Amino acid sequence: MKKSAKKQLTAAILAGLTLAVAAPALAAANPFSDVPAKHWSYDSVSKLAAAGIVDGYGDGTFRGDKTMTRYEMAQIVAKALAHEDKANAEQKAIIEKLAKEYQDELDNLGVRVSTLEKKIGNITWSGQVREWYEWRDDSYDNYGDNTNLRTRLLLFLNAPLSDNLNFKGRIWAESGWGEATDYGTGADASMDQAYLVGTNGNVTWTLGRQGIQLGQGLIYAWFANNDGATLTFGGDNTKLTLAAFKHEVNARFFGMPVRADLNLVAANVSHKASDDLELSLAYAKNRKGDKVSIPGGPSFTLDADVVDSWALGAVYKGINNITLTGEYGENRSDLAKAWHAVWGEGYDSAKAWVAQAKYKGAQWNKPHSYGIWVGYRKAEPGFAGINGDYVWETPTNIYGDASLGYFMDNVKGFDYGFDYTVFKNGIFTVQYFDLEDEAIGVFDRKGLVTQLRYMF
């Protein structure tokens, strides 16, 4: 045999051996191999297409009856990742599962799967840091001029347990500048959210420690340490939520700390009347027989209810770049009636209303976007809205009546604010409020809050 022939034969044998060894790996990594007809990906992508998260081949249809290559499927998954902000919890879990399946193909397409990169095991982490300066002048209860510089860290976690079940949690920590502890009580950190979220068609349920908001937040909006369950029915335009939960209220009674363990039931209806108008109707009530205690002192059982409230609210966006938010509510509890008797008024309920007009608004993902707003609130003694001032974006609480701690109670006045996106995922906010008590108008509450929040 000639040398050239020997060389050709040797090369052919080596090439054959190389291909024989590499063939399984190449087949597994081949982006143009077909996805089997009964592969779970087809059903998952069909669900996303039905929800409008993806549009298949770009012509508005997804041809689920056509066998696709891994490369074609990865292209659709890339579209889903680009529209993940439109997805609900169940749909996000589907997208993440698809992204993990087609991660190699997505890498070849140059698509960064950031949600996978942030995973530790099966848990997705994100967070928020808040730095703020706060000045308050409360001319009652010996509070007077009060200045705070504080840092708050929130860590959010999400762990898909199945296609229709997720675990969600939040770790909260806060302290003053230059301090490792908060209020001298040791390291102030806790898991103030830890709950399950399940979905089944148009039904969603939650169970565990979670945040709860009713309506626009006038009667209840507290995003930590509500232990209980919710059940939500309905579609995109109208939803009904039922809730039962326990919340510990730390309040003050003329300067004396008081703790109340409230067991509440609640209902909330939200309705999208049009593209520009959303309506809400909310109700909450605690049971008679809840316990009240004084730290280091006696405890006793309430023979009266504190919350028996309803509220009607609306959000309107039909005016160019302006959002109008408003809500009216009443509390018909025994507490509200008792406080009206104290102030010499025989009403059956304590009333409250809030309104806010906001121009534009800072957006997390849009640097240099901004917003300005003006708001007004008025609450009679005994209204007792448990909201921590959520609606008006104040990072800490504007105290109401001296007996009611952080409740929205016995207060009236204006607030003004400005927010600005300094960098992507970073918003700077300034707010000034000038309030007084509703009953006799002598206890002023003024304050200035500046804060920087950034997400990661």
Image (spheres, rainbow, N blue to C red):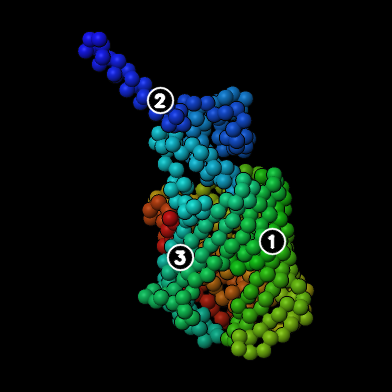
Residue 50: % across, % down: 63, 35
Tag 3: amino acid: Leu
Work out whether 371 lies above or below 287: above
Question: Is 270 or 116 nearer to us in this picture?
Answer: 116
Query: Which type of secondary structure does the marked residue at label 1 adopt?
Result: strand
Give the image quarter of residue 453: bottom left
Give the CA separation, mark 1 to mark 3.
Answer: 26 Å
In the rendered image, the quadrant that contains the N terminus is top left
Residue type for callout 2: Ala
Q: Which residue is painted at 74% across and 81% down in the image?
A: 302
**Which residue lies at the image location 55% right of the left edge and 60% below the top edge?**
169
Q: Quadrant of the C terminus?
A: bottom left
Q: Nearer the viewer, residue 45 or 320?
A: 45
Please give the residue where the numbered disc 1 appears in the rendered image.
229
Dot 3: few (<14), some (14–19), or many (≥20) neighbours within 10 Å?
Answer: some
Residue 445 percent across, percent down from the top left: 53, 76
- In the visual, does 345 lie left or right of 428? right
Q: Is residue 409 above or below residue 87?
A: below
